[in-house]
Amino acid sequence: MEGKYLELVQNCINYARSFMTLPEPIESYFEDCPSDRFKTMDNAAEGCGNKLYFNKPWFTGQDRWENHRVDIEFFIFHELRHLHQHYEIALLDSNNVVHEDISTIVSWKNGFINYTRNEGGSTQAVNLSQEVEIDANAYALCLSNMLHISDNIELRFSVPQEAMDLADPRSRQYYENRPELKRYIDKLKRDAGQPVVRKPERNELCPCGSGKKFKKCCIGKGIYD
């Protein structure tokens, strides 16, 4: 039963490796809920070291799999970002070459030392406001948008609005200042022969030619904004 889900996970891993350093290999596991790791359905997945753990009933739900697969991809990318964070911390601790600013890695390390898990209730708001979570949500948003940049679909994620309010502006910063994201987007523009244009208003027709309004099409994907 887990074969098709593991295939999706591996596809996301392969895509993410184009943008960030990750351990090799990455192992994936499904665990029941409730369990010691997943006490509630508020926590979809966890990642640490070279291991990904998925909340099995959340991940394999029929409606989510058939109608909201981009939501699953988002949470895979989110956990892969955590693996990247841990990987960079390990590189720094062992005096190896790192791929992030040292100040950023130190902030991640401190964040994990004082980490608050999302176990529902009052812990959720604290969890979402942690820097390691803001970064993971923002980077996952970038990867999800870029993966579906040509799909002309409006991406919807089951992320609390408080988390998206923090992740969305950060993701826009990442499009501007993360070299690996800028290179990817610039290449797409070159391949499409697309000139630099002003950012459309939300209710204007999308410049991609889909006939949809910008807010329903390519907004947030880093092409025109």
Image (cartoon, rainbow, N blue to C red):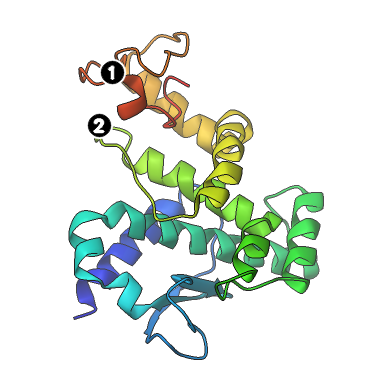
Residue at 63% over, 61% down = 125
Label 2: state its secondary structure.
Answer: loop
- 25 or 133, which lies in front? 133
Per the rendering, the mark at residue 208 is 1
- 225 or 160, which lies in front? 160
- 58 or 14, which lies in front? 58
In the picture as drawn, the residue positioned furthest to the front comes out as: 121
Q: Is residue 102 visible?
A: yes
How many angstroms separate mark 2 from mark 1 (CA)? 9 Å
Give coordinates of residue 87: x percent, y percent. Answer: 63, 66
Label 1: state its secondary structure.
Answer: loop
Q: Classify 47 as above or below 151.
A: below
Residue at 54% over, 39% down = 168
Q: Would residue 206 appear left or right of 63 to someone viewing this image? A: right
Q: Classify 166 as above or below 123.
A: above
Per the rendering, the mark at residue 152 is 2
- 205 or 113, which lies in front? 205
Give coordinates of residue 151: x percent, y percent. Answer: 24, 35
Do tag 2 and tag 1 residues touch (Cβ < 8 Å)? yes
Residue at 50% over, 64% down = 79
Q: Would residue 149 appear left or right of 88 to someone viewing this image? A: left
**What is the three-letter code of the residue carrying label 2?**
Asn
Per the rendering, the mark at residue 189 is none
Give coordinates of residue 77: x percent, y percent. Answer: 45, 57
Q: Would residue 66 appear left or right of 91 to someone viewing this image? A: left
Quadrant of the image containing the N terminus: bottom left
**What is the three-letter code of the residue carrying label 1?**
Cys
Q: Classify 128 as above or below 139.
A: below
Q: Would residue 93 appear left or right of 31 to someone viewing this image? A: right
Give coordinates of residue 97: x percent, y percent. Answer: 73, 57
**How many numbered marks are there?**
2
Q: What is the quadrant of residue 190 in the picture?
A: top left
